[in-house]
Amino acid sequence: MKRRTLALLSAAALATAAATGCSSSGSAPASSASGPGSANFGVNATGTVQFWARTVSKTLAQKLVSEFNATHSNLKVKLTLTSINDDTTSLATSIRAGDPPDVDGLNDIDMPTFTRNGSFLNLTKAIAKLPYAKSLSPGHLGLATYQGQEYGLPYWADLSVLWYNKQLFTKAGLNPDNPPTTYAQILSDAQAINKLGNGVHGFTFAGDCEGCLGFTVQPGIWAAGSYLTSGPIGSQTATISNNQALVQALTLYRNMWTQKLVPDNDRTDDGPTWGQDFVAGKIGIMPGGYGQIDDLATPAQLASGEFADAPLPGANGGYSTFDGGDDFAIPAAAKNPSGAWEFITWVLQTQQQQQYPDLGATPIRTDLLTPAFSAAHPLDAVALKALGHGYAPVGLIYNQAFNVPSGPWFQMFTTAVYDGNMTLALQQGQSGFTQLIQQAAA
Amino acid sequence: MIVDESGPRDTTVPRVRSARPRGALWRGGTLRARRARTGILLVSPAFALVSVFVLFPLGFAVYISLTDWPLIGSYHFTGGRNYSELIHDPVFIHSVLFTLLYTAIVTGPILVLGYAMAAFVRANRPGSVVFRTAFFLPFIVGLATESFMLLLELQPDSGVVDAVLGKLGLASVATAWTVHYGLALGAICVFVVWFASGLTMMILMGGMQGIPLELYEAANVDGATWWQKERRITIPMLRRNIALSLIISVIGSFLAFNQFFILTQGGPGTSTEPIVMWIYQEAFIAYHLGYATAGAIALVIVVGIISAAQFYLLRDDAGPKSPKRAPGRRR
Amino acid sequence: MTSASTALPAADATRFPRRAGGGRRRAGLATYLTLGTVASIVFVLPLAWAVFRSLLPSTLVTSAPSTADVHHLTFANYSGLIHGGILHPALNSLLVAVMTAAATAVVATMAGYGFARFRFRGSGVVFALVLATLMVPFQALLTPLFLEMHTLGLTNNLIGLALFYTTFNLPFGVFVMRNTFLQIPWELSEQAAVDGASATRTLVSVLRPLVVPGIATTVLYAFLFSWTEFVGALTFLTSNDLYTLPLALLNMEYGSVGQVNFGYLEAGAVIAMIPCVVLYVALQRYYIRGLTSGVVKG
């Protein structure tokens, strides 16, 4: 008898779960009377706003939320930090269970997975009303756009730049105010610094960290106007085989490796210790993140001017940056979308954006690059300048392609840089990327 | 002989029951039925928990494995397509073979080392509690944490492993353990044996302490050697414990994930990717939950078959045993 | 009629073999202690090294070890963790682990007793199903499990997490407890039955002293499992103030680009180790040899 009761209970649970789980993720959007297009959307909202942010943005999120709560009596924001590696899954599961947050700070490269199936509110009309709409980071906004409609907007930027050690530059007889602007210059500067010996190396990269490499190597390719994948989702193509800019980038790293301009244990650095040798003063030039070094270096080091940064150059000039960081999105089933929008627009105000550099982030509005900003935050100003030329690949395959060791990006990198076989690397890359694109489109 | 007076009278044949006690137990039906009810009651909480948290989600998972369930968005029923794709997926096949190889390498040493340690610490000699704690400590700290510690120490030029081996002249100071298949696998296998043998030790030790001393004393009288005593008394009496530790060890190896995720990320390429890591990649990186779940169900079936086989081979025959003939007795 | 001196049973002769002087016994003990100490050091050394690393500042933690490091010992990692708020998650973990251990002990003992001593239809099947739990990689069940638990209101809830952990500790616990009960001779429980005790009474007063080692093992295993478990906690807990220790540590250790703060990691490991070692040592007194000596194994 006990067994029958159990079976009944199970059936009931199954039915309920199936009902919540099977429904397609987007429920009906908030009625247009108070929806994103209306006048009172995000104005004097009340209640609570559930805000989920990634743990990597902890310092920023906590500061913003506590300040908002202190200055707003009508609305309170409750912050939840999602765990590393779990951000997208917990959001997706919460949407499936019908219980999503009101606003989510989602890793921007994960946005395309959600924008195409009605998971998020269409914010196009609301964004158009923002006075600074045209200055929002194009790369971040592009990732939130689907078929011309915007389902999110930038939150904070985690950009890649070319860090260099001014003291080592001086020691090696180089001009510390003249950072390299082409690959050839990077190479020669690194060679000069490497000659200093004494445990010092000219260059460094996280040689076993595919994601780190994607973050720092690609901008040089984009600076030349070239991209590894292109086209709208569903009909993308991979441009690997004939990609000159890619070949040049891989050749640069190959030279760094064969000429021993990098420490030996770069080969096995898969991220946990990336940047520590630079911060210890042992490296001349390091492509890396603005937030990364801002986090690792001591305030004294940052103030002393020992380190400086420059935009990541292309092979023959130009520059770009990887638009990392997060986008804001409001799930379609959010209970307090108006409150969410009020919080979002508050965060995007100048006063809040200007606090970003000290919290390890870069603002997402290009109109904030004023002389005052450059004077106050010289290191972040470089990143902010590059934001206007920034980019991040829009697609469904970023993680599989770039963030796993077995992905085509890392396979291509290791074959070209460690094995020295460029032809094979390009072949593998072309077929690997094409295969992933086809699988995703299926 | 007890005559049962409780049933309807049949004067021709006196009813006889076996010598079982009457009285307080004889309530509500036959003893057997009552004991059966008690038994069911006793196991029902366990069964309830297992049904809710394992059996039902497993059923749901089987359903998911028959669809193209994505991370987010609607899904469609696809029948057995995921499974037929699995069989032709070289990465999946490789992960299965790799997991089998890994299991084959570590299972023996874990059992042997665990047994040796258990034999060493089972008596209450001075120091044995300290030794037991030392041997079990790696298990207590946990595999994930220790994997990170190992990651730090396997780094070339800065980790202690290369520093020590370099000083001893056994390896170059710049040996990059985690990016070469053979080195990574070797290091991980040694690491796992260090971690897991403590648990085997505890399981076997518990069993060893249940073996009556008289058996050993009798054997000693007959002049049995230490090895003969182990082989003829200890090991046979430990069958169930050995079975448990083997099964846990094999299943643990089949479900290995943390150490590979932290130390090699499955690299170089996918050469050190065990099955659960393949599932993780498919589910949480590629967002093919339906396909990943099919792989998971396949894994459950494989592990089930192997465990059933182990149970069968290591089953103990039911029924009371008489004490074994003491070895050495030749008269 | 024998005098006391010749009344020594043969058993005593084996325990204290008459060899040349008592020196042989002392030598045996010395060998045992030496061997044991060496082996223990080999086992514990990596962990001791980690403790050493945990006392180094973050700049030195990831560099090549050198003897000069001894001059730079600091508690900075520990204070960093404590100020970062590690104590609250540690308490959460403790709560969950204690609930899990208690629940596992109770449920597994009942079930082990039921399977070992009682015959009922389907007992083999139910036992196999409970054991089958061991074979299920619960990473594979996370999505269905989350949806189901959400419906039952058990997500984001320490009790729900404890129930989840209890279930996955049942195979081990039930197996151990069933073994324990099978090893106890039938006569003992029968004797109690003759004396009129119900099944519960029998279990509690007569058999308890004999099953305590099994319970100790089950409790220890369940505690360790839930204390170090990570994936389940990650999936089922969404609010930060319910986070358990492994989750909190992970989030404290990781930087913005996947860097790991190894100093924090090592210190976190040391902090996490302490309750487990304490519990382990406390339970040692239940593993005493000879509880069933003198009784023929049935």
Image (spheres, helix red, strand yellow):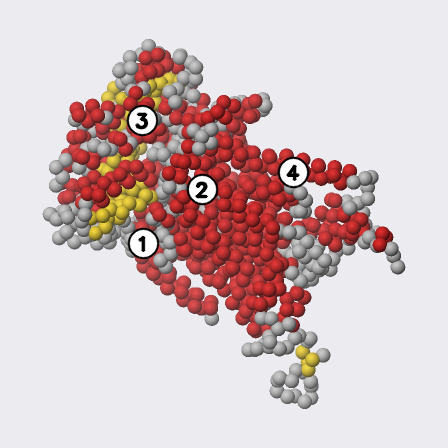
Q: Residues within 10 Å of mark 2 (few under 14, many from 20)?
A: many
Mark 4 closeness class: few <14, some 14–19, many ≥20 residues within 10 Å? many
What residue type is disc 1 on?
Ala
Pick the quarter of the image with the C terminus of chain A.
Answer: top left
Which structural element holds mark 2? helix
Chain letter for the residue marked with disc 1 in the picture: A
Q: Which residue bears the numbered disc 3?
A: A299
Q: Position of residue B160 (x, y in %)?
A: 52, 28
**Count of marks placed on residues:** 4
Callout 2: residue from which chain? B
Residue placed under numbered mark 1 in the picture: A97
Q: CA distance from mark 3 to mark 4?
A: 50 Å
Q: Nearer the viewer, mark 2 or mark 3?
A: 3
The three-letter amino acid code for the residue at tag 3 is Pro
Q: Chain of mark 4?
A: C
Can you identify the residue that label 2 sits on?
B277
Chain of the residue on which disc 3 is drawn: A
Q: Which of label 1 and label 2 is nearer to you?
A: 1
The x and y percentages for residue A29 are: 20, 52
Identify the residue under disc 4.
C36
- Pick the front one: A240 or B240: B240
| Residue beneath the point at 42% across and 34% down | C77
Query: Rounded to the nearest whole Å, what is the CA distance between mark 2 and mark 4?
Result: 37 Å
